[in-house]
C-alpha cells in the first residue's frame, strides 16, 4: 500500500498541483500506521528554508489527495495523510559537505 500511495501522490503532485512553492517537491517515503488510519508522507524539495511552508501547503491539499487516492485505489478507507519534511536528506547533504571540507583541508 505504501508504494502505491507514494506513486499516486507523485503523479497527483505533478498533474494536479500548480503551486510554485511546491515546484520540485518529491515524495521520499510513505509510512502507513499498522491500523491503516494514518500515513506520514515525507517530502523534500529544492529549498530547505521552505520546509515548513511546503508541508503546510501539502497539508492543505490532503483532502484532495485522499479523495483521489480513494478513487484510484478503489478503497473505502484511505489513511489520513500527514506531510512532513524529510530532514534525513538534509542531514546527509550536511555530512557530505563536512567530509568534503575535511578532505580539502
Image: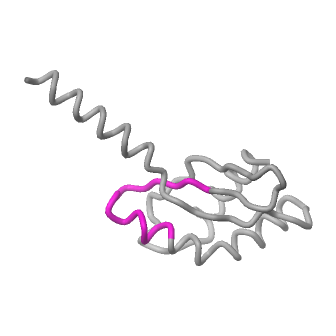
Identify the colour scheme used: one colour
Position of residue 54 relative to residue 34, above or below, is below
In the figure, residue 76 lies in which quadrant?
A: bottom right
Position of residue 32 relative to residue 71, above or below, is above
Residue 29 is left or right of residue 71, and the answer is left
User: Image point 63% across, 64% down: which residue?
Assistant: 82
Picture coordinates of residue 43, whole percent (x, y):
52, 55
User: Image point 66% across, 72% down: which residue?
Assistant: 62
Picture coordinates of residue 66, whole percent (x, y):
74, 69
Q: How many circles with numbers are drawn on the protein?
A: 0
Give, as a single range, the part of the protein colored magenta: 41-55
7 and 86: which is toward the camera: 86
Residue 22 is left or right of residue 58, and the answer is left
User: Image point 74% across, 61% down: which residue?
Assistant: 38
User: Image point 43% across, 71% down: which residue?
Assistant: 53
Quadrant of the frame with the C terminus? top left
Residue 46 is left or right of residue 4, and the answer is left
Picture coordinates of residue 5, whole percent (x, y):
73, 54
Furthest toward the left, the residue is 105
68 and 50: which is toward the camera: 50
In the figure, residue 96 lies in which quadrant?
A: top left
Furthest toward the front, the residue is 34
Magenta-colored stretch includes residue 31: no
Amino acid at each position: 500500500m505504501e508504494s502505491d500511495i507514494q506513486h499516486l501522490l507523485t503523479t497527483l503532485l505533478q498533474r494536479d498541483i500548480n503551486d510554485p512553492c511546491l515546484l520540485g517537491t518529491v515524495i521520499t517515503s510513505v509510512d502507513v500506521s499498522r491500523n491503516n488510519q494514518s500515513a506520514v508522507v515525507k517530502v523534500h524539495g529544492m529549498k530547505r528554508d521552505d520546509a515548513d511552508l511546503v508541508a503546510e501547503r501539502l497539508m492543505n491539499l490532503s483532502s484532495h489527495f485522499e479523495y483521489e487516492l480513494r478513487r484510484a485505489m478503489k478503497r473505502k478507507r484511505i489513511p489520513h495523510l500527514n506531510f512532513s519534511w524529510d530532514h534525513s536528506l538534509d542531514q546527509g547533504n550536511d555530512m557530505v559537505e563536512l567530509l568534503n571540507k575535511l578532505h580539502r583541508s
